[in-house]
Image (cartoon, helix red, strand yellow):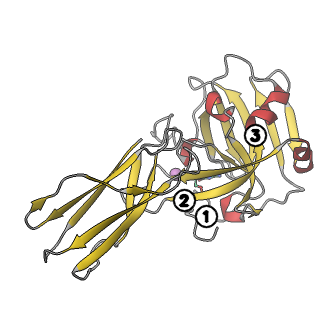
Amino acid sequence: NADFYRIDTALTVPQLSRDEWQLRIHGMVDREVTYRFEDLKRFEVVEDVVTLTCVSNPVGGELISNAAWIGYRVRDLLAEAGVQPDADMVLSMSTDGWSAGTPVEALTADDALLAIGMNGEPLPVEHGYPARLVVPGLYGYVSATKWVVDLELTRFDRAKAYWTQRGWSAHGPIKTESRIDVPRAGQDVPVGPVKFGGVAWAQGRGVRDVEVQIGSPSGQGDWQPAELGASYSDDTWRLWSFDWYAQEPGTHEITARATD
Ligand SMILES: Nc1nc2c(c(=O)[nH]1)N[C@H]1C(S)=C(S)[C@@H](COP(=O)(O)O)O[C@H]1N2
Ligand SMILES: [Mo]
């Protein structure tokens, strides 16, 4: 968990105990509901392995991580409030005032969680203790509210969340991407066999292929298939590797691409 990327606007991390925590569900619902932490016990516990990504992750960047999230289906929590049919957005609010706008459809999918645990431990404070949202397939800024205390059922044509007020798109589906982790950029490799490796992701769709192209002083190579690691689910990244033989001296440019 200490290696999981962290992105938020919090200069000091909100400290909220499980006893203080409440989740209010209101807006376009049949009846308002407020859950205390102990109320959650009556819902089914689920664990999903989900790769979370930041929209600000640059190509090859590190603002992406994979974790086993433990929690409750948001759908079950919303069901007791009764979502009205013309609500199409859930405005989720953190205790520090940050907010995200998520399609009702995505939040009522089977794998959208109110997470209270991460990789077998209580959610770390930096990652939203005591509870946060995890919605596979959507960038964090439109879905992954940490220290979440409030869910308002509303509409995209009525409400704007923190980053949409600042000009970011109201919808943020994660794009298919791949990353080269080894060797690192600029690294020297000796003549002989070299193994390339990295990760590729297409949450919600799954990765079908990863291909690698090697550019050398004598020109661009063809796209060649990489080897894919096991797939836990369509919502998680896949490891890939590629065996190459370093022969020609000089700078080589390695490019990877993924197909969902
Ligand atoms: N309260 C709060 N939740 C937040 C944010 C934030 O600024 N404040 N940032 C979001 C963004 S942009 C991302 S990418 C994810 C990152 O989650 P992590 O820090 O656990 O990796 O959290 C989301 N949840
Ligand atoms: Mo983000």
**Looking at the figure, which quarter contains the N terminus?**
bottom right
Mark with earlier residue (2, 3)? 2
Work out which residue is located at the far bottom of the displayed protein and give it.
190
State the separation of the CA atoms marked 2 and 1: 22 Å
- Element under label 2? strand
Looking at this view, is 57 or 160 the one in front? Answer: 57
Residue density around tag 3, few if under 14, some if 14–19, many if 20 or more, within 10 Å: many
- The image shows residue 86, relative to residue 179, as above or below, that is above
Mark with earlier residue (2, 1)? 1
Residue density around tag 2, few if under 14, some if 14–19, many if 20 or more, within 10 Å: some
Looking at this view, is 209 or 40 the one in front? Answer: 209
- Element under label 1? loop
The kind of residue tagged 2 is Ser
Task: Tell me: 128 left or right of 62.
Answer: right
Picture residue at 48% right of the left edge, 59% below the top: 63
- The image shows residue 114, relative to residue 252, as above or below, that is above
Picture residue at 7% right of the left edge, 65% below the top: 218
Location of residue 32 (image quadrant) = top right
In the image, residue 235 lies at what x, y percent? 56, 45
Label at residue 163 = none
Query: Would the CB of label 2 be found within 8 Å of ligand 1?
Result: yes
The kind of residue tagged 1 is Leu
Looking at this view, is 213 or 76 the one in front? Answer: 213
Report which residue position mark 3 lands on: 73
Residue density around tag 1, few if under 14, some if 14–19, many if 20 or more, within 10 Å: few
Report which residue position mark 2 lands on: 65
- The image shows residue 55, relative to residue 125, as above or below, that is above
Looking at this view, is 16 or 88 the one in front? Answer: 88
The kind of residue tagged 3 is Arg
Q: Marks 1 and 3: which is nearer the front?
A: 3
Location of residue 112 (image quadrant) = top right
